[in-house]
Amino acid sequence: MEHKIIITIDGWSSCGKSTLAKQLARELGYIYIDSGAMYRAITLYFLRNHVDWTHPEIVHEAMQHVKLTFMSNHKSGQSEMHLNGENVEYVIRDLVVAEKVSEVAAIREVREFAVRQQQEMGKNRGIVMDGRDIGTVVFPHAELKIFMTADNEIRVKRRFQELYEKNPNITMEEVRANLEMRDYIDSHREVSPLRKADDALELDNSHLTIKEQLEIAKKWVHERLPATKG
Ligand code: CDP
Ligand code: CDP
């Protein structure tokens, strides 16, 4: 039987995690899950419904109405985030959501909700998931854990370019402030803070192209897939 593994990719914001995760999943015929999209979609729900997330009981009530599903887009073949049946893949990338997502993702009940679903999605293995706590909390026994980093300014430029295409009014300063704030909250929160798992391999892609980072990761994958060696 084919030996399928679990690959986790964690790291700082905008360093290329999802780009690598998508490509690896495509190469291997695995499922790709963008765990950040789940936290972004919950944040969108809270913002739209004026949920005061500083109160645990209000959060508890609100979470009863959140249904998240990943649906494959037939045209692009990409998996897209749906919130209560609505495709929100595009809107969750807005800075308005990015401004609040780290606060929402720090809430224990929100994390428990997301982690339960993430673990369920990985039960048949053959999955590449990117996020902040995937190698440490969601799949602590994953066969391959990658921790990605890149210089701050390079990450700011990469994310600015993406957001500028959608909204030419956005400034580099706004993007820098958002990345700094999210990285700070994500790595200092009480529940599942962002940290490198002890057994994760570090990939600094500051000066790597997308193709180069893929080649490095593929080598690591093949070292863990005995059936495909040689
Ligand atoms: O793509 P980018 O690095 O900007 O962020 P993302 O992966 O879309 O994640 C958005 C936010 O969700 C992060 O800044 C974290 O606050 C939160 N997140 C998390 O707490 N745990 C995860 N496994 C994934 C994301
Ligand atoms: O998922 P995460 O937020 O970590 O980053 P991403 O969305 O995969 O990548 C952020 C941007 O950096 C994308 O526009 C990628 O094309 C770009 N990138 C790059 O220019 N060079 C790399 N080696 C990796 C990513």
Image: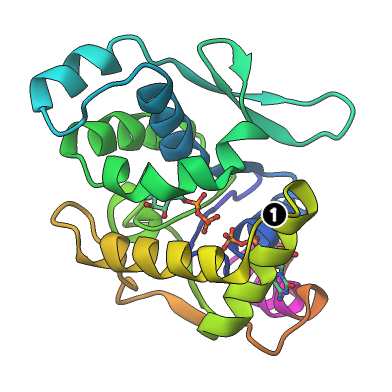
Say whether residue 99 is visible: yes
Q: Is residue 5 above or below residue 215?
A: above
Per the image, the residue denoted by label 1 is 169
Tell me, yes or no, whether the highlighted magenta stretch contains residue 49.
Answer: no
Of the residues shown, which amino acid type is indicated by label 1?
Answer: Asn
Q: Position of residue 72 (x, y in %)?
A: 73, 26
Crowd rating for badge 1 (residues with CA inside 10 Å; few <14, some 14–19, many 20+): few
Q: Quadrant of residue 50?
A: top left
- For the point 34% across and 56% down, the residue is 133
- For the point 30% across and 68% down, the residue is 184
Residue reaching furthest to the front: 169
Q: Is residue 46 above or below residue 181?
A: above
Q: Is residue 159 above or below residue 77?
A: below
What colour scheme was applied to this rendering of the protein?
A: rainbow
- For the point 45% across and 61% down, the residue is 178
Is 216 or 105 nearer to us in this picture?
105
> The C terminus is located in which quarter?
bottom right
Which segment is the magenta one? 213-227
Is 10 or 223 nearer to us in this picture?
10
Relative placement, left or right, of 41 versus 119 is right
Q: Position of residue 181 (x, y in %)?
A: 35, 64
> The N terminus is located in which quarter?
top right
Residue reaching furthest to the right: 75
Relative placement, left or right, of 55 versus 49 is left
Is 131 or 199 nearer to us in this picture?
131
Q: Is residue 216 above or below residue 46?
A: below
